[in-house]
Image (spheres, rainbow, N blue to C red):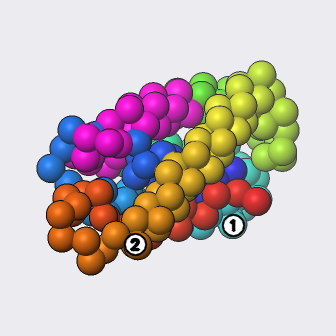
Amino acid sequence: MGRISILVGLACLVAACGGGSLSLQEYGTQAEELVVVVAVRIDSLDAELDSYAQTDEGAQTYWMRRLDARVEFLEGLESLDPPDDAVELHGIVIDLFRRLNAAEEALAARVATMETGIAPEQWWDTPEGRAANAVDEEVSSICYVAQAEFDKTEERDAFADTPWIPSEMKEVVRVAFGCAE
């Protein structure tokens, strides 16, 4: 779930930011890098989830590290200066990740009140877990939207050698957000 959310968020940022000094390609590349970093961090945590979940301290450590990764990702996204044609989508993605972070913070608080040794699957089978999953599904959906926006730029390749077309209208952006199948 964490990797998907991160990838989706990155895709959204790359496809929808605006007003900044970065080119669309620079923006996409920086967003993609943020997604990769957060995905690796969360995947690493999830790979060891069973060992974390065996103690209260382990569960707290898991959630602290997961939330730290999410916060750093969001801060990185917020610091990007997107090109004009990506401003609207960037705003949507930022809002979505703020909501995801808030939902996962609520879930982490709920987990802190649960008995020791509760299986991680049970964490997600709570009102807070279902709320976090719902926002994560929205993030997954936006990933496809953002990826499609970047993929559309490949059609511009046909105009690469046309001197009178402005460079931003010829820019081809190749990113891979790794949206969930």
Mark 2 sits on what residue?
157
Looking at the image, is 86 positioned above or below residue 99? Answer: below
Residue 170 location, quadrant = bottom left
| Numbered disc in front, either 1 or 2 | 2
x, y (%) of residue 57?
A: 61, 46
Horizontal side, residue 139 vs residue 47: left or right: left
Residue 140 among magenta residues: no
Callout 1 secondary element: helix
How packed is label 2: few (under 14 Cα within 10 Å), some, or many (20 or more)?
A: few
- Residue at horizontal 48 percent and vertical 46 percent from the top: 12
How crowded is the residue under tag 1: few (<14 C-alpha within 10 Å), some, or many (20+)? few
Q: Which residues are magenta?
A: 76-101
Most frequent secondary structure within the magenta stretch: helix
Relative to residue 93, is residue 172 drawn left or right? left
Q: Position of residue 67 (x, y in %)?
A: 50, 43
- 169 and 30: which one is in front? 169
